[in-house]
Image (tube, rainbow, N blue to C red):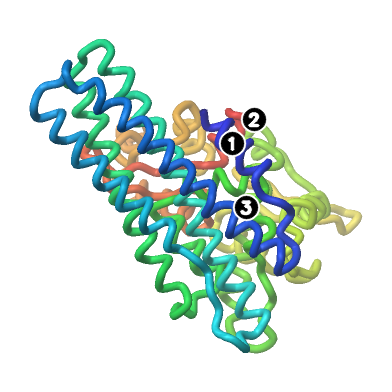
Amino acid sequence: MLNDKQTTLQDLLPKLKRLRDLVKADEKLTDTSINLLFDVRDVILHIMNSTKSLDHRSTRIIDHLKQRVDSLIDRARRQETRFTPGTQKNIRKQILKNMILYNLIIFSRSWDLKEVFTSIDSNIVFGDIEAIQKHSKTALDHIHIIDNLFSEKENILKDTLTTEELAENLSQNFYQELELAEKAGILKGIVQLEKPKLFGKEKYYDQLGNILLKVVQQSFGLEQQTKPIAVRAIITRLRADYPKVNAELSDVKKALVLLANNGLIILEEDEQGLQWLQLFPSESEASIILSLAKSKGYITLEEIVIETGWSQKKTSAELDKFVKAGCAVMDSSYADGTKYYFPGLTDQEES
């Protein structure tokens, strides 16, 4: 179903180059999310017609969920991007890009919500009350999240965050949704990186370094990460995958030097003056962590400590390198320990 969602996104949105493309994308995502929520409502109505086989508690829960979905539909239909007369074009573009980021997540969660209710509908056939109540809780979580996203989205016109800053903030809780959008090629027309003329250069090089690491992970694959990769090849991939990133050769080299200084890559120059990098040297801590996380796409700090015998302090420090570089996302919402997700590994397994 993940591939279906990705394909839908690719078919839904055009290449986001001009202002009118962004306007259309905003409208299409909003309309599609509304249609998905109406689909959810239809499934709920079908479930309610089958409630004779449900216990009183489940019937009450389904009725409550219907009310919440109706409320979401009302909110979604009121969501409209309006600009005050005289708003500058560059400001309109930034606001629309931020809107699209939220709409991408709302679309994804609405899709997931429909799948959950479809599962509930199937559970009713078998009279599986326990599964129905479990899925109902999941549905309520999705509803809460979509509702909160609508609230946050309403404040975009007052917000001064750049699209890159917003994407970074949203990725803390919605990395899977943004990763899906990135795989669908949507973020290439939204997220861009401009080199500042005076101030903020340090952050620029940090962000550029993060993007370069993602390019290596996603384009060259895990099996290539123990072998030297030509810097020229990475620059070619960068320009193809992230055309909005404004970076000269000197900028890329400086960002790579910073990554090398942080211990995330080895940067070398051969006798001909060509530069090569090695992302994760064999037998290094980074290589060990990746090999442990490869099968599931994620790993916990405790699992690494058990497998390697490292101290928690050392393990945490090594994992923080991945998080800082944008190669891993930390999720501390699990009872069995903090999980570190490696989207690059997941991408390779699904491709």
The x and y percentages for residue 60 are: 13, 34
Q: Decide which of tag 3 and tag 2 comes sooner along the chain.
A: 3
The x and y percentages for residue 292 are: 45, 31
Amino acid, disc 3: Leu
Q: CA distance from mark 3 to mark 1?
A: 14 Å
Q: Decide which of tag 3 and tag 1 comes sooner along the chain.
A: 3
Dot 2, how many residues are within 10 Å of its Cα: few (below 14), some (14-19), or many (20+)?
few
Amino acid, disc 1: Asp
The x and y percentages for residue 116 are: 35, 31
For label 3, the SS is helix
Read off the residue under disc 3. Answer: 213
Visible in this render: residue 128? yes
Q: CA distance from mark 3 to mark 2?
A: 18 Å
Pick whichever, 38 or 331, lies toward us.
38
Left or right of 233 in this view: 349: left
Dot 1, how many residues are within 10 Å of its Cα: few (below 14), some (14-19), or many (20+)?
some
| Camera-side mark, 3 or 2 | 2
Visible in this render: residue 269? no
Left or right of 282 in this view: 301: left
Read off the residue under disc 1. Answer: 347
The x and y percentages for residue 347 are: 59, 36
Pick whichever, 30 or 201, lies toward us.
30
| Residue 90 drawn above or below residue 317 | below
Identify the mark at residue 351; answer none if there is no mark: 2
Report which quarter residue 10 is drawn in.
top right
Dot 3, how many residues are within 10 Å of its Cα: few (below 14), some (14-19), or many (20+)?
many
For label 2, the SS is loop
Q: Residue furthest top?
A: 126
